[in-house]
């Protein structure tokens, strides 16, 4: 529970934070990819059912991530301030109490999500355009998934507490182990093995729940015995509410921001559903390939939160500006690389999941158009992370609202009417580019190199 990110060269620090996070995100998102691979072998209907369920799963992860961001921002800034005062022991106790109260809050929110999810399965997915033949399959998958929500919310918050200290390796190792467990259990539960009967979609959901339960157990043990960040004493109700308020002041706008995405994707899914089951399946596969392609952006933005939080708390403002400069350059490089790779090899990648020519055609068209905007998408993510770490979540929320509700959703509807599915994909590309440009200008205005002291000396910290 000490500062680790306020000294040393910025580039190597960001790499050290990001590489383990890439591994962790690859494993976490790999849950979905692995499930998709095995479920695709059950048939197109089952794959379409999982595609319908995807926005709901992302919604649950979005709520968890928003809460985790609020927790991580508060804790990283508190750690950054620890050497600015003479009462470091008291500051450590404050961080410990804040971490524990955040875990309690995540448990409470998890229970609420379970209740809401189980009571809204049929009306929700009917509204999304699921046909009567697909709805029972969706119900099979989501009933078990909703029961495992607590194993989603609490571990994500716990891992972000660990990351706030500057330790990104441990959460990533835990996620990697859980991913291996999921990989082993998926074919056993889906297709059956020995005394274990074939459970189909229910087996895929159960394997994921067990894997996430592993993350929960290991994370809590690590937080308590290694980082010593769990307080076993009950807080006063006033202190509990104050800590919850601090976390939620950042978490609620982020939860709102994160929810916007799944809602918009659900709307787009309903548009694509009008083109048939194969179109939904192709869109689902393309969305998952996209997540893998931009995973580095997700990892880098996640790493920015503890880095910016600790440096801002320690009043090392110039290091934040320099980090943003590096992040911007990397986003442009990686975005261009992925656009070329997916434009040339998108069909081959999709064929690994499904051999249906219609499914491949839809997914390949998506991966030809949308990746053009990946560099701008990365800039949006990093800008949002910086604003959140500064305790200013509203700019991030506004960027998400503009992108998903004001641009993507209406343009997707218009594009579908004028150009079919290609119009939907072009709308996603345009929304990323437009908001990415705005995010760059907004971030530069708040983190300007014109305000740097001794810029030549500071550039040696890159």
Image (spheres, grey):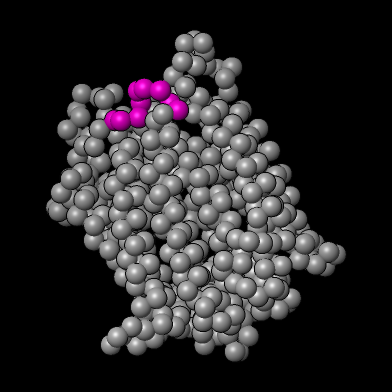
* Residue 315 position (above or below residue 224): above
Is residue 49 found left or right of 176 in the rendered image? Answer: right
Q: Main secondary structure of the magenta part?
A: loop
Is residue 397 found left or right of 115 in the rendered image? Answer: right
Residue pictured at 41% horizontal, 69% vertical: 113
Residue 51: x %, y % from top left: 57, 72
Numbered range of the magenta stretch: 3-11
User: Is 9 part of what is drawn in magenta?
Assistant: yes
Quadrant containing the N terminus is top left
- Between residues 18 and 230, which one lies in front from this camera angle? 18
- Between residues 355 and 68, which one lies in front from this camera angle? 355
Residue pictured at 34% horizontal, 55% vertical: 176
Residue 124: x %, y % from top left: 56, 78
Residue 231: x %, y % from top left: 17, 50
Give the total of numbered labels.
0
Residue pictured at 48% horizontal, 56% vertical: 255
* Residue 249 position (above or below residue 137): above
Residue 299: x %, y % from top left: 46, 45
* Residue 52 position (above or below residue 214): below
């Amino acid at each position: 529970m000490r500062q680790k990110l306020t000294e040393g060269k910025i580039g190597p620090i960001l790499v050290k934070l990001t590489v383990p996070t890439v591994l962790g995100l690859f494993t976490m998102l790999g849950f979905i990819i692995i499930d998709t691979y095995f479920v695709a072998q059950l048939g197109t209907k089952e794959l379409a059912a999982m595609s319908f369920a995807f926005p709901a799963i992302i919604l649950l992860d979005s709520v968890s991530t928003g809460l985790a961001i609020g927790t991580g921002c508060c804790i990283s800034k508190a750690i950054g301030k620890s050497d600015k005062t003479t009462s470091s022991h008291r500051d450590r106790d404050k961080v410990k109490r804040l971490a524990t109260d955040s875990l309690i809050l995540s448990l409470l929110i998890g229970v609420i999500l379970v209740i809401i999810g189980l009571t809204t399965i049929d009306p929700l997915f009917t509204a999304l355009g699921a046909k009567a033949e697909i709805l029972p399959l969706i119900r099979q998958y989501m009933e078990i998934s909703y029961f495992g929500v607590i194993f989603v919310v609490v571990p994500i918050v716990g891992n972000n507490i660990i990351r706030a200290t500057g330790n990104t390796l441990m959460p990533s190792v835990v996620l990697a182990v859980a991913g291996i467990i999921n990989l082993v259990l998926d074919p056993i539960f889906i297709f059956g093995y020995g005394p274990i009967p074939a459970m189909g979609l229910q087996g895929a959901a159960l394997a994921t729940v067990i894997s996430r339960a592993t993350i929960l157990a290991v994370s809590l043990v690590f937080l308590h015995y290694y980082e010593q960040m769990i307080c076993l004493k009950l807080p006063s109700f006033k202190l509990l509410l104050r800590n919850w308020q601090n976390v939620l002041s950042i978490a609620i706008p982020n939860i709102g921001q994160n929810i916007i995405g799944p809602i918009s994707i659900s709307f787009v899914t309903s548009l694509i559903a009008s083109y048939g089951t194969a179109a939904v399946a192709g869109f689902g596969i393309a969305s998952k390939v996209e997540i893998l392609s931009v995973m580095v952006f997700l990892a880098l933005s996640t790493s920015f939160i503890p880095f910016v939080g600790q440096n801002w708390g320690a009043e090392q403002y110039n290091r934040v500006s320099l980090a943003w400069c590096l992040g911007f350059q990397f986003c442009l490089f990686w975005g261009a690389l992925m656009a070329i790779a997916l434009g040339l090899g998108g069909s081959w990648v999709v064929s690994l999941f499904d051999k249906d020519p219609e499914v491949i055609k839809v997914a390949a068209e998506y991966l030809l158009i949308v990746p053009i905007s990946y560099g701008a998408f990365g800039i949006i993510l990093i800008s949002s992370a910086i604003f959140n770490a500064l305790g200013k979540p509203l700019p991030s929320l506004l960027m998400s609202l503009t992108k998903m509700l004001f641009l993507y959703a209406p343009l997707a509807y218009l594009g579908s009417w004028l150009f079919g599915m290609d119009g939907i994909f072009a709308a996603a590309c345009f929304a990323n580019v437009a908001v990415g440009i705005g995010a760059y200008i907004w971030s530069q205005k708040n983190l300007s190199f014109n305000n740097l002291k001794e810029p030549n000396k500071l550039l040696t910290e890159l």
